[in-house]
């Protein structure tokens, strides 16, 4: 179900990108984050997290520190980008896709909180679709 949610979310973002009409500032960023959380909930997301851990393992520093620093940097970039003009530019949208995968790759309290958030958001999307099509 996460694949379907991801495809729908990114498809809606593509449609909104093509529209010339103004959209609410939060709409694209919310859809991109839902798509990123759904991506992290799939096998592809787990594979990407494992590849990130392999790449970070090359650095002679503890890999959890590097992933944690990258996660904090992306969070700061996202908050700064959206906070400046109340619009999610390309930097923030890319960060919103990558953050859930970094939460999977990380270790520690930040990664646990982020993974819990990612799982909750992807399950909300799946449960909403289930209710819409008449499932329980």
Image: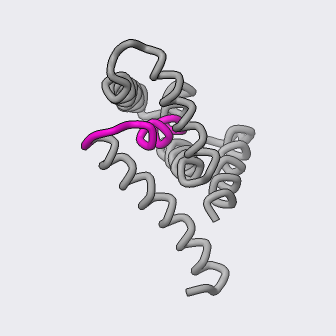
Tell which of 52 and 32 is nearer to you. 52
- 97 falls in the magenta region: yes
Decide if residue 83 is in sight here.
Answer: no
- Residue at 74% across / 39% down in the picture? 18
Magenta stretch in the rendered image: 96-109
Does 94 sit left or right of 76 as displayed?
A: right
Question: In x, y percent, where is residue 54?
Answer: 52, 27
Decide if residue 75 is in sight here.
Answer: yes
Question: In x, y percent, where is residue 126?
Answer: 56, 68
- Residue at 67% across / 81% down in the picture? 133
Quarter the N terminus occupies:
bottom right
Query: Residue 82 is drawn in which quadrant?
Result: top left
Quarter the C terminus occupies:
bottom right
Tell which of 72 and 85 is nearer to you. 72
Visual colour scheme: one colour
Question: In x, y percent, where is residue 89?
Answer: 53, 28
């Amino acid at each position: 179900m996460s694949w379907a949610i991801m495809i729908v979310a990114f498809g809606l973002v593509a449609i909104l990108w093509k529209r010339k009409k103004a959209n609410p500032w939060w709409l694209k960023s919310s859809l991109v984050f839902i798509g990123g959380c759904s991506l992290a909930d799939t096998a592809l997301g787990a594979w990407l997290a494992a590849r990130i851990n392999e790449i970070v393992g090359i650095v002679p520093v503890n890999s959890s520190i590097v992933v944690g620093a990258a996660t904090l940097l992306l969070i700061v970039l996202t908050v700064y980008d959206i906070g400046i003009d109340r619009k999610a530019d390309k930097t923030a949208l890319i960060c919103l896709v990558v953050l859930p995968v970094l939460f999977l790759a990380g270790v520690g309290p930040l990664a646990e909180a982020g993974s819990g958030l990612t799982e909750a958001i992807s399950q909300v999307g799946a449960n909403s679709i289930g209710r819409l099509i008449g499932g329980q």
